[in-house]
Image: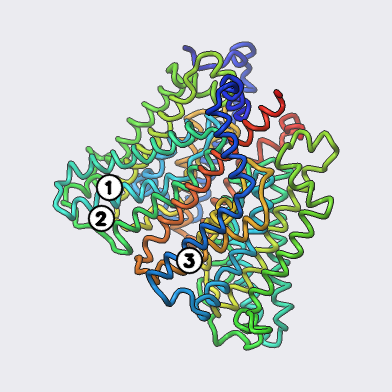
Amino acid sequence: MDSYDTGKTAVAAAGSTAVKRKVAWSSYAARFRELGLLFFIVLLCMIIQLRNPSFLTWDNIQDLVNNTAILSILSVGMMMVIITRGIDLSVGAILALSGMISAMTVSEYPGTPPMLALLLGAVIGIVCGSIIGFLVSKMDLLPIIATLGMMNVYRGLTYLISDGSWVSAHQMSEAFKKLGTGTWLGISYLVWFAVLVYVIAYYFITHTRTGRQIYAVGSNPEAARISGIQMNRILWLVYAIMGGLSGMAGVLWVAKFASAQGDTATGYELSVIAACVVGGVSIAGGVGKLSGVLLGAILLGIINNALPLINVSPFWQMGIQGAIILAAVLINAVIKRGVDRTHLMRRNI
Amino acid sequence: MNSRTIEQKMDFSWRRFFLQWEWMLLAVFIAVNIINANLSDYYLDFTNLRDAMMSFLDKAFIVLPMVLVMIMGDIDISVGSTVALSAVVMADLYNKGVPMVPAMLICLLTGTICGWLNGWLIVRFKELSSVIVTLSTMIIYRGIAYILLEDQAAGGFPSWFSNLGWGYIGSVPIIVVVFVVFAVIFSLLLHKSVLGRWIYAIGNNSTSSRYSGVQVDRIKILVFTLTGFMAAVAALFLTARMGSTRPNIAMGYELEVIAMVVLGGISTSGGKGRMIGAIIAVFLIGYLRYGLGLINVQAQALLIIIGLLLILAVMLPKLKPGNRKQA
């Protein structure tokens, strides 16, 4: 309906050259969005570097990349959810729950192999995500309502099973903590995990039928249903994947910070959503690229890393993050308007 | 205009009248009270029951406009942050020497501006859903509150201000009186005014109401602005009750408010529901909380219960066989 409205004005003004120039600009922006984002990141890095020379040192870059790895893993799942026109607010809560359960398992049975703990976390996450997927697909709940409700259920469960106490560093085995701190070929495991997730996700969403169906469901649900795509199954799958990734990220998080708490990653879903919308994933569904999401995650990682370096109070972080989300969402909307207009004009000609 | 829909006028049956969501809620409400009374000997005490209202009615101020928002088919998850920001602005100004009354007015103004901005963004950028707009303003408002006050508490308000939270008129708490006034105003607004009819129309079909001459954009902005204003009212009472304020107050209010509204029978897809249902739901959740608090149920278990209530409330009407959408 909305695109119809904007389309109408485009028809009315189709003759004027002013509109044509605007069209060219916005479709250009849509096509080279990732490049623009990359350019912006480079520019930002240069500015920060000028303010504080310790920004682009090997140590700090490593620190930055390690901190961004978990965010970028989660962004992949969130991208798929947003592509289907959904949203998932339960990411932080699932992360905390699976992190807590696996940390408690590890402290109870110190012999648990780290990979088993990771698997356990992922399974818990998939179960949590599947419940949300069930609510969204079979029960027809709005994603925002389902995830808002389950977010609190999972968060509450985390407190209940841990009885409000923490699992701290000395209760975890060295092998487990290695998950978050160890390196291979000089690069941390976290980054390798992120690379693995991105490679698999790239293959999945660009080269498999199911992956393409995710886009179809998001860009035109009606057409997708008519062409025989099992909408329910796709929606379910998307939330289960999101849950699985959150679960895995939970274990990595706990291993990295060597502590599991009831309030782990509270509000982290907002950073994940921010990374997605900054990376060009459209809230209206159907649009989003892995490259964009990765850049979005890196941009947010840089901002979080650099604010203390350039002497900005940490209390500004939230406001800045919110402003970035809003700006990105608005820019996406304006670009989409232009793209829609171009499509409509092409059809008219 | 008459508030009853044509359908109801056409075939009014007692059976259907008593099968309404609101009666079910009332039954659940009574059941909750009976259970609570059995679980704890302290529950059925008039003063306790009355004073318990003080602690949950501040959320109820936001429930009233949220009903309008959700009947329009929108949602506002920035209300908790709006409460925090208005409270923090008021406290900050007061501590910088602004007298209390102007500070309170500015608190209301802050909330109103926050709400107006939500509405303006939603209307101006129609391709954006209210979910994402209010999600980003939720972060921004709370972020500004943190910028203003960092992690400190601000307080030291004049003693008459705390009366707002703890005072009585006769033997009725002030907050109850104010809530009743607002509840009546909002009920009349929704069920007896042209504006209310328009809000239902927008919720049922926004495009066709625009073509029938309803000023959809203006009404949306108005309703979101009202939501911001009421969030600021809630901020006043919450701050008065707590005596001081921090940037992290009213965390998770959006969940409880939305849970109350949805439990009150307002459809999440818009166009359906009544004010009285939401008001019953306020008392239901409020007294459920109070009763469970008396028997030492942890706050985190309450989180789970409220989350599940929210989901059940949306799921139940969809489980009725004839009611499911063909998807």
The CA distance from mark 3 to mark 1 is 50 Å
Residue A321 in picture, x, y percent from top left: 46, 56
Q: Subunit of mark 3? A: A
The CA distance from mark 1 to mark 2 is 9 Å
The quarter of the picture where residue A208 lies is bottom right
Indicate which label's residue lies in the foreground, 3 or 1: 3
Please give left or right for residue B306 compared with residue B92 in the image: right
Q: Which residue is mark 3?
A: A45
Q: Earlier in the sequence, mark 1 or mark 2?
A: 1
Q: Which residue is mark 2?
A: B243
Q: Type of residue at label 2?
A: Gly
Q: Residues within 10 Å of mark 1 (few under 14, many from 20)?
A: many
Q: Type of residue at label 1?
A: Gly
> Which residue is drawn at the image coordinates 71% and 42% (left, top)?
A218
Q: Type of residue at label 3?
A: Cys
Q: Which residue is mark 1?
A: B165
B169 relative to B208, above or below: below
